[in-house]
Image (cartoon, rainbow, N blue to C red):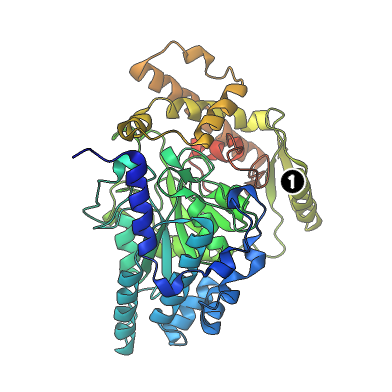
C-alpha cells in the first residue's frame, strides 16, 4: 500500500479536528456566508460582528461568563458557587469552537474530557472541597505542551505519527491547581516566525482584522484570548512569541525570567541538549491582573519539584510603591536600523509624557547602548547553530510557509558586523564566542541599571502594530530581552 502524501496526512488531521467540534456548536452557513473570503485577504472585523451572540449557539449566560469577568472574578464566582465549573467550561468550550471556525486558532480540543473534569470539580466543591486556587478555570495552552494520549505536532506533518505518552510538567501543575485544560492552540511551522501558519492547521487569523497577522509563535493563544474563547492562555517566548501576539491581538502577555514558569517536557523542533538559548513559558490574558494570578499560583506550587529545568525560586509578594514615590524609568529609544512606525512613536511619547506628569523621571537609553541590534545578531547566530527543524520538514516533503522565507529575507537585509569576527569559527569555539558576546551585553546592562539607578525600563514592543500576513520579519525590540533572559510584559 502506498504511503500517504503530506497533503493527505494534513487533510486527515484537519477532518479529525473538525469532527471533534459538536455539530450543535458549528456555525450555520448563513453566518459564514456573510464573511469576505478568503478571510486572510479581506479585512473581516470578527470582533465587531458579535458572532457568538448572533449565531444563537451560546446562551445569554454563556455570553456573560465569557465576556463580563476578569480571571479573578471568575475564580471568586467558581469558589463561591455562583457559577459551576461545568457552566464555565462549556461556555469557553463553545466560544473556543466558534473561534476555531472563524480564526483557525486551535490544534487539539478536549471538550468531552474537559466536561468530565468540570463535573469532577463540581462534585468536589459540593462536598466542601476546593481543589486548588485555579479551581474550575478553563486554561488554553500552546500546542507544544504535551497532554498524554494526544498529539503535539507543533505544525510538522512528520510529527503526526507521534502521540504524547505523558503530560508536560506545567500541565500536571495546572491540573493540581484545579484548572481545566480544554484546548491547545496554533503555532507557526518551526516556531520561529511571527505568523502562526503551518501546513496542518493553516493560518491563525487576527479577530480584529483577518487581513493582519495574529502574531507568533503563540498566535493561536493571542487570537483565542482576544476572541474571549479563553480566559487565560499559556504561551512560550524565545524571541517575542508571547508579547508579539499580545501586541497584534490587543491582549496582555508576560514573558517571565527564563526558567521561572516550567517550560520542560514540551515537543520541540530543536536538537536535544542545545539549551543555551531557552524559551520562557508565560500567560496571555485580557486583564493584566490575570498575569500575576497565573505566575503566583504556579510559582507557589514549587514547579522545580515537577520540572528539573525550572528554578526553585518562590513567589515574592512585594509591596507596591507608595503613591508619593517617584521612579527612575529607562526609555529604550528608537534604533535607526529598525525605525518605529508613527503609531508606535506616538504611544511611547504619550507614555513618557504621562509618567513625567506624575513626577517620574525618564532616562533615555539609546538603542546602541541598549544593544538592541547587537543582541538580535547574537540570537540569530545561536538559532543558526541548529538546523534540525528543516530535517523535520524534509521528512514529510511539506513546503516552507511564506513567513519563514520572508523572515530569512528580512534578516539578510539587516546588516550587522557585531558577529563578523566569529564568522570563521565552528563547533564549540563558535558557541563559546557567542557566549562571550552575550555575557558582554548582559554586563553592559548590569552597568546601566546600576549607573542610572533604574527602577524599571520601558520601550517599543515592535517597530509596528499588527501588520499584513508574512511581513512581520525579525523582532529586535522583543528578542534582545530573550538574549538577556529578562522578564518583559506587553
Residue 466 seen in this snapshot = yes
Vertical position of residue 150 compared to residue 199: above or below: below
Q: Nearer the viewer, residue 337 or 306?
A: 337
Residue 474 horizontal side relative to residue 140, left or right? right
Asked if residue 189 lies left or right of residue 228, the reply is: left
Instruction: Count up the numbered dots.
Output: 1
Image check: 406 left or right of 272? right
Query: In this rendering, is residue 441 above or below 88?
Result: above
The image position of residue 216, as x and y in percent, is: 52, 46
Residue 84: image quadrant is bottom left
Q: Nearer the viewer, residue 354 or 413?
A: 413
Q: Position of residue 62 (x, y in %)?
A: 51, 79
Q: Quadrant of the N terminus?
A: top left
Please name the residue shown 39% across and 80% down the image: 86
Please give the name of the residue rendered at 47% of the width and 87% of the height, measured from the top-left corner: 82
Q: Residue furthest left?
A: 1
Nearer-the-camera pick, 37 or 205: 37
Direction front: furthest residue = 1
Question: Can you identify the residue that label 1 sits on?
Answer: 362
The residue lying at 61 percent from left, 37 percent from top is: 471
Secondary structure beneath label 1: strand
- Percent x, y of residue 324: 72, 63
- Number of residues whose C-alpha sits closer than 10 Å to that of mark 1, classed few (under 14), some (14–19) or many (20 or more): some
Residue 275 drawn at (x, y percent): 35, 35
Closer to us: 163 or 329: 163
Q: Residue at x 56, y 19 (%)?
A: 418
Q: Is residue 230 visible?
A: no
Amino acid at each position: 500500500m502506498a504511503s500517504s502524501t503530506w497533503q493527505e496526512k494534513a487533510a486527515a488531521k484537519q477532518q479529525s479536528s473538525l469532527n471533534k467540534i459538536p455539530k450543535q456548536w458549528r456555525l450555520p452557513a448563513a453566518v459564514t456566508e456573510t464573511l469576505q473570503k478568503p478571510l486572510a485577504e479581506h479585512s473581516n472585523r470578527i470582533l465587531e460582528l458579535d458572532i457568538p451572540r448572533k449565531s444563537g449557539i451560546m446562551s445569554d449566560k454563556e455570553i456573560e461568563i465569557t465576556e463580563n469577568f476578569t480571571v479573578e472574578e471568575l475564580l471568586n464566582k467558581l469558589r463561591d458557587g455562583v457559577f459551576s465549573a461545568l457552566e464555565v467550561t462549556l461556555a469557553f468550550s463553545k466560544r473556543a469552537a466558534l473561534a476555531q471556525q472563524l480564526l483557525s486558532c486551535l490544534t487539539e480540543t478536549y471538550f468531552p474530557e474537559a466536561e468530565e473534569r468540570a463535573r469532577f470539580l463540581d462534585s468536589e466543591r459540593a462536598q466542601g472541597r476546593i481543589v486548588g486556587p485555579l479551581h474550575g478555570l478553563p486554561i488554553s495552552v500552546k500546542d507544544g505542551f504535551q497532554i498524554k494520549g494526544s498529539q503535539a505536532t507543533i505544525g510538522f506533518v512528520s510529527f503526526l505519527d507521534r502521540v504524547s505518552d505523558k503530560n508536560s510538567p506545567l500541565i500536571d501543575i495546572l491540573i493540581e491547581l484545579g484548572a481545566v485544560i480544554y484546548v491547545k492552540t496554533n503555532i507557526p511551522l518551526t516556531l520561529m516566525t511571527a505568523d502562526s501558519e503551518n501546513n496542518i492547521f493553516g493560518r491563525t487569523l487576527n479577530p480584529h482584522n483577518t487581513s493582519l497577522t495574529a502574531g507568533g509563535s503563540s498566535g493561536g493563544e493571542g487570537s483565542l484570548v482576544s476572541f474571549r474563547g479563553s480566559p487565560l492562555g499559556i504561551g512560550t517566548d524565545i524571541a517575542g512569541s508571547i508579547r508579539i501576539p499580545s501586541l497584534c491581538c490587543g491582549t496582555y502577555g508576560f514573558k517571565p525570567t527564563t526558567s521561572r514558569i516550567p517550560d520542560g517536557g514540551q515537543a520541540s523542533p530543536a536538537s536535544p541538549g542545545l539549551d543555551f538559548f531557552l524559551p520562557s513559558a508565560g500567560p496571555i490574558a485580557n486583564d493584566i491582573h490575570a498575569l500575576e494570578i497565573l505566575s503566583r499560583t504556579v510559582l507557589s506550587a514549587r514547579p522545580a519539584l515537577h520540572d528539573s529545568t525550572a528554578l526553585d525560586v518562590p513567589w515574592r509578594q512585594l509591596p507596591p510603591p507608595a503613591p508619593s514615590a517617584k521612579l527612575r524609568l529607562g526609555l529604550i529609544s528608537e534604533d535607526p536600523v529598525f525605525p518605529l512606525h508613527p503609531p508606535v512613536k506616538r504611544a511611547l511619547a504619550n507614555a513618557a509624557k504621562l509618567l513625567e506628569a506624575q513626577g517620574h523621571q525618564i532616562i533615555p537609553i539609546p538603542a546602541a547602548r541598549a544593544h538592541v541590534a547587537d543582541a538580535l545578531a547574537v540570537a540569530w547566530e545561536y538559532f543558526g547553530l541548529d538546523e534540525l527543524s528543516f530535517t523535520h520538514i524534509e521528512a514529510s516533503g511539506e513546503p516552507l510557509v511564506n513567513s519563514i522565507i520572508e523572515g530569512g529575507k528580512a534578516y539578510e537585509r539587516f546588516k550587522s558586523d557585531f558577529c563578523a569576527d566569529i564568522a570563521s569559527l565552528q563547533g564549540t569555539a563558535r558557541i563559546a564566542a557567542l557566549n562571550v558576546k552575550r555575557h558582554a551585553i548582559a554586563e553592559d546592562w548590569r552597568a546601566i541599571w546600576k549607573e542610572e539607578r533604574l527602577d524599571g525600563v520601558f520601550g517599543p514592543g515592535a517597530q509596528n502594530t499588527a501588520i499584513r500576513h508574512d511581513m512581520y520579519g525579525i523582532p529586535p525590540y522583543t528578542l534582545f530581552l530573550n538574549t538577556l533572559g529578562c522578564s518583559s510584559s506587553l
